[in-house]
Amino acid sequence: MALKENIQTLLAQVGEMKATSAEELESLRIKYLSKKGEITALFNEFRTVPGDQKRELGQMLNQLRQQAESRINELKEQFEAKQAEADKLDLTRTPDPIALGTRHPLSMVREEIEDIFSRIGFTIAQGPEVEDDKHVYGMLNFAPEHPARDMQDTFFIEKEKGVQKPTDVLLRSHTSSVQTRVMTSQKPPIRVLCPGRVYRNEAISARAHCFFHQVEGLYIDKHVSFADLREALLYFSKEMFGSETKIRLRPSYFPFTEPSAEMDISCNICGGKGCSFCKGTGWVEILGCGMVDPNVLEACGIDSKEYSGYAFGMGVERITNLKYRVKDLRLFSENDVRFLRQFESC
Ligand code: DAH
């Protein structure tokens, strides 16, 4: 009666047949119903069964085969239904909208400055934020005892814990340090724009922060004159604040430029008539500039008899204030989305 038991075992197996993929289903079919399958083997065995048992066992065997076939078909239909469902997916449908972030107003203004100067041949140069005294002050013609190191409220980095005296390692207080990096590593003609973050030990308020952003410009070549500087700055001002914008240069002092100047633009808020923003003067200061001091050129290994150049430096926050009238500097670094979202369409 071994055949009968085998049929019963297989009947139980067939009733519990499961498949999670079309491949699994196919291997079940091969296992039971193919030429070398287990059910086919029982049919072969059936030939040797004595005549009196043929009727009962024959019926059982046929039932087994039918059940196996119908279970396999049933599973197949399930897979096909799933596939049909998947085929119904509309892959041409537009996806759900993703909430987009906004560009930071300081990035937008910095990129605009870069764009304007790149149109007259300036390329971008970058330098480290953690600097040394030589590149930030020494090579820029600051005398060793020059009070600017204090005036600019430099953050000195302590070499050892507890050592208070100033060390050579510091956070740059202006992007003019990138000038010295570029001049010592490149040969004239040099025409670079150096955007970056600077640090000063200031109490944080609406008008001052311990870090802010500057863009430095430097142009060195043969026969560069103050008139070239003025033209470049006039072009920039008109591009940035509108073609009606006027500029004026007032004599000033920086250790690294001679002569030096500060540049005002006609107040873009009142159009030069005088308002509270320009304190009634019609002018607002936006940058410092001048002809690169020959001492700086020489310190950087450039022959000051052959080459001359101009430099300028401006605060990105200041330009952004003028463009978008942000009254409190702290808003730029607080990451308040209510503030940042106002620049969504810019
Ligand atoms: N480094 C100056 C500052 O931080 C800005 C500046 C003034 C840069 C005149 C220049 C320049 O290149 O020529 O206040």
Image: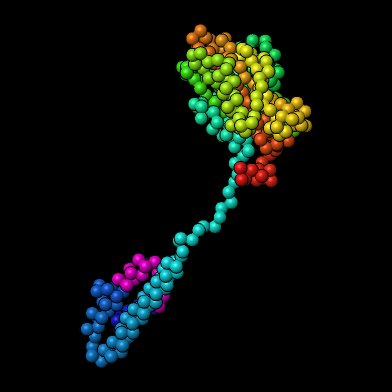
Apparent side of residue 66 relative to residue 272 in the rendered image (left or right): left
**Residue 320 visible to an observer of this rendering:** yes
Q: Quadrant of the N terminus?
A: bottom left
Which portion, as a residue range, is magenta? 15-31
- Give residue 116's quadrant in the image: top right
Vertical order, 281 against 17 (above or below): above
Q: Quadrant of the C terminus?
A: top right
In the rendering, at what x and y percent does residue 141 appear?
61, 12
In the rendering, at what x and y percent does residue 44 appear?
23, 79
Asked whether 33 or 334 is in front, the reply is 334
Apparent side of residue 237 relative to residue 25 in the rendered image (left or right): right
The residue lying furthest to the top in this view is 305
Q: Main secondary structure of the magenta part?
A: helix
Asked whether 146 or 112 is in front, the reply is 112
Q: Find out whether residue 19 is within the magenta segment.
A: yes
Number of disc labels: 0
Q: Which residue occupies 58% across, 48% down?
A: 100
**Residue 128 visible to an observer of this rendering:** no
The residue lying furthest to the bottom in this view is 52
Vertical order, 83 against 318 (above or below): below
Q: Which residue occupies 58% across, 27% down?
A: 235
In the rendering, at what x and y percent does residue 124 appear?
52, 28
- Give residue 299's quadrant in the image: top right
In the rendering, at what x and y percent does residue 319 appear?
65, 31
Q: Find out whether residue 169 is within the magenta segment.
A: no
Vertical order, 150 against 88 (above or below): above
Q: Which residue occupies 57% across, 9% down?
A: 295
- Tell me the colour scheme of the image: rainbow
Vertical order, 62 against 192 (above or below): below
The residue lying furthest to the left in this view is 48
Q: Which residue occupies 76% across, 30% down?
A: 274
Asked whether 302 or 258 is in front, the reply is 258
